[in-house]
Amino acid sequence: MAVRLSRAACALPGGCPVKEKFVFALLFALFAGSAYAGNSAPVPAYTFICNGSGLGPCPNGGRTDSLILGSDGNFYGAAQITTWETGLVTGGNIFSLTPAGKFTVLHTFTPGANKNFPDGDLPGALVEGPDGNLYGETIYGGIDGCDGDCGYGVLFRVGRNGTGFQLVHKFCSETNCADGYNASPMVVGTDGNLYGTTPSGGTSGVGTIFRVTPSSGAYEVVFNFSLSSGGQYPSSLIVGANGTFYGTSSGSSGELLFNYTPATGAMTTALLNFPNLSHGSGLALGPNGNLYGFYFVYGVNGVSLFEVEPDGSNLQIFPFYNTIDGGGSPDGLLLASDGNFWVANFNGSAEYGNIISLSPTDGSLLQTISPFGATSSVGGWPSQLIQATDGTFWGSTYIYGDATKGHFALGTVFSLNEGLPPR
């Protein structure tokens, strides 16, 4: 789910990262120091360089959302912006990066004749379809008669070599946004189609599940959320080995775990009885086949893991693994080849983020790596990690990195070798 922010709010360097993450006071973040700890050091594989001393164009993009590992062994990602000027933060591109560090811009989102970004503006996370194409969504654009950060975004696809860019769907193009908007990242189902959620829009206005058929490019809403069916404001999806999709939503009595079966369209929910005023966030499959997510308590500093069986039974809430500054802002939950969860904390206890590993057995904190900062070569504010087939972690940061005089860096792609076994 994207945070819809105005261009004016993003006018300063480091301003308003466009994700559903912890958004905090910009000036404090820019001048705060950062701590360095941990046993390993990420290595920058590519740095996004912009022209100017703090504002200016970014020819190869900046603010990478997250990475995916393609079936060809290369990495692919979306840089959210290509223009960073006073009162204007727009554009973005799709890029590839080889493990050896060769960077290629595959597609750039341009303003168009009327500066309304008809093909989208500010792209987010990607997924590779079974047809070998890259699919993704933009946060803004796709509407006539506006300038920059308006419109409800688009769903697009493009070849891994940058050819064949195509608009698949313009969000909120149906009456009352029945087709949804503010889409979450998509996943590939076991039936070979792509699925995603929108926490906004739909027939009840509180979210949808949609499907994209790669062979035809058809976009279709296959489920509409409501308080009486599935809850509201769904999270992104994960898919089990049996083809069932899992996610969380909000019900009238609290947080829900939902199961959606695409073959039949069946939707079931189970109430997650979190105590107090609290909630979970996101899901991942654990080594035992159970579902894991993050657990927060409103007004209390801390974050922990929860574990639940796929049918919603046997909910377990582990003790807080971090109570500093609210526990940070964890982005993604990666089950790595060592059997533990690895997490990128977007801000973390050192303001610029860190990387942690957690035990799926009891949720305890196993390791903390804190190399990020305003003067770090890998930059600050890391996005979720992925693991390559050789066991090495790869990730990206939103801001900073090394740049020569007259230029500034707007994030990096980095690798981190913790000596884990191959996947």
Image (cartoon, grey):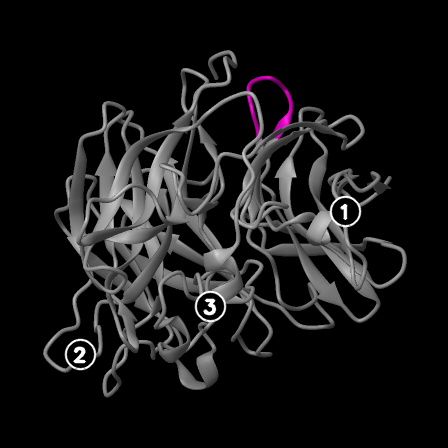
Kind of residue sitting beneath label 2: Lys
Of the pair 311 and 98, the residue shown nearer to us = 98
Q: Position of residue 217 (x, y in %)?
A: 28, 56
Of the pair 163 and 204, the residue shown nearer to us = 163
Kind of residue sitting beneath label 1: Thr
Disc 2: CA contacts within 10 A as few (<14), some (14-19) or many (>=20) = some
Q: Which mark is residue 182?
A: 3
The kind of secondary structure the magenta stretch mainly shows is loop
Instruction: Say which residue appears at 39% left-offset and 28% top-offset.
Output: 415
Of the pair 359 and 198, the residue shown nearer to us = 359
Instruction: Say which residue appears at 19% left-offset and 36% top-offset.
Output: 103
Disc 3: CA contacts within 10 A as few (<14), some (14-19) or many (>=20) = many
User: SS at mark 3?
Assistant: loop
Name the image quarter holding residue 122: bottom left
Q: Which mark is residue 115?
A: 2
> How far separated are the C-alphas under marks 2 and 3?
21 Å
Q: Which residue is mark 1?
A: 323
User: SS at mark 2?
Assistant: loop
Tell whether label 2 touches label 1 (CB within 8 Å): no
Q: Does 252 sit above or below residue 234?
A: below
Disc 1: CA contacts within 10 A as few (<14), some (14-19) or many (>=20) = some
Of badges 1 and 2, the one in the foreground is 1
> How far separated are the C-alphas under marks 3 and 1?
31 Å
Residue 258 visible within the image: no
Q: Which mark is residue 415?
A: none
**Which callout, 2 or 3, points at the residue further toward the start of the chain?**
2
